[in-house]
Image (spheres, coloured by chain):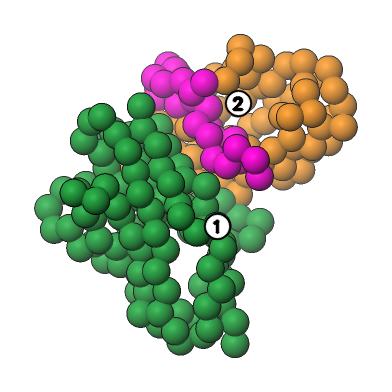
Chain colours: A orange, B green
């Protein structure tokens, strides 16, 4: 079974631009979560989706948004990028009856 | 609100020596506790979790952790480390057993020396 796949692996953007990151969960997993990892703030929860509905949201500004499609694939979007948005963005999926979270390798976003 | 404190940011240890990584948490509700490991350039991998029952939890790769409710701690231990255990370790809490909204500690970087 393929693991959680995140694309792209690396991304470089400039301030003010917007970016879309993609996450394909493990086949059969309907729950997808996103986390931001930075050296200063550590790992912080962004949001969680289940069956195309946002179930939970962390304390991030409205510039951060996400969605989930009917095939459980998820995207997150960051608009009007700031330097502080440079981070590793991790996606995790979980099966409906499995409590374990499976993480992808992340997308490393650099904002210049 | 919940918070997690990992008391050591870095722990150097010699190969085959024991290691303990400390984790304390605070929460106004019952929590579920997790330890994750992150190898360089990779995502997180679950080592072990405490949901209920026995306070001593055994995980993968020879790791174990003990839940201490009175001290609000969940320390991770391994009796004998290998070079391959060099990684960053994160303690996390959730207010739901199957919750995806984890609150993480700042991480402890373990460097195993030959």
Does residue A57 show up? Answer: yes
Between A14 and B75, the one lying in front of the other is B75
* Residue A56, quarter of the rendered image: top left
Q: Is residue A103 above or below residue A56?
A: below
Q: Mark 1, residues whose alpha carbon is within 10 Å: few (<14), some, or many (≥20)?
A: some
Mark 2 neighbour class, 10 Å CA radius: few under 14, some 14 to 19, many 20 or more: many
Q: Can residue A101 be found in the magenta stretch? A: no
Which is the main secondary structure of the residues drawn in magenta? Answer: strand
Foreground residue among B78 and B84: B78
In the rendered structure, the residue with mark 2 lies on which chain? Answer: A
* Residue that label 1 marks: B9
Circle number at residue B80: none
Left-right relation of B64 to B106: left
Circle 1: element type: loop
Q: In this view, does B99 lie to the left or right of A27?
A: left
Tell me the number on the disc at residue A75.
Answer: 2
Q: State how far apart marks 2 and 1 are (Cα).
A: 32 Å
Indicate the position of residue A52 as horizontal and vertical percent values. 45, 19
Q: Can residue B84 be seen in this view?
A: no
Q: Where is residue A110 in the image (x, y as percent from the top left)?
A: 79, 37
Give the SS element for disc 2: strand
Q: Residue at x 69, y 38 (%)?
A: A87
Which residue is pictured at 35% across the width and 49% down the height? Answer: B24
Rendered-image quadrant of the C terminus of chain A? top right
Query: Residue at image x 27%, y 42%?
Result: B32
Q: Give the range drawn in magenta.
A: A34-59
């Amino acid at each position: 079974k393929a693991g959680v796949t995140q694309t792209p692996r690396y991304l470089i953007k400039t301030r003010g631009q917007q970016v879309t990151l993609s996450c394909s969960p493990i086949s059969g997993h309907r729950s997808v979560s996103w986390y931001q990892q930075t050296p200063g703030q550590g790992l912080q929860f962004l949001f969680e989706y289940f069956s195309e509905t946002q179930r939970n949201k962390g304390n991030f500004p409205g510039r951060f948004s996400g969605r989930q499609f009917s095939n459980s694939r998820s995207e997150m979007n960051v608009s009007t990028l700031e330097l502080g948005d440079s981070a590793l963005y991790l996606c995790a999926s979980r099966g409906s009856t499995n409590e374990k979270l499976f993480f992808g390798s992340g997308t490393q976003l650099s904002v210049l | 609100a919940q918070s997690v404190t990992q008391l050591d940011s870095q722990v150097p240890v010699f190969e085959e020596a024991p290691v303990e990584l400390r984790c304390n948490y605070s929460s106004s509700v019952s929590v579920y506790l997790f330890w994750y490991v992150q190898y360089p350039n990779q995502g997180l991998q679950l080592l072990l979790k405490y949901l209920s029952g026995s306070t001593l939890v055994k995980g993968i790769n020879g790791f174990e952790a003990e839940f201490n409710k009175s001290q609000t701690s969940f320390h991770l231990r391994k009796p004998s480390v290998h070079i391959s255990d060099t990684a960053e370790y994160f303690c996390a809490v959730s207010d739901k057993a199957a919750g995806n909204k984890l609150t993480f500690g700042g991480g402890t970087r373990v460097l195993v020396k030959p």
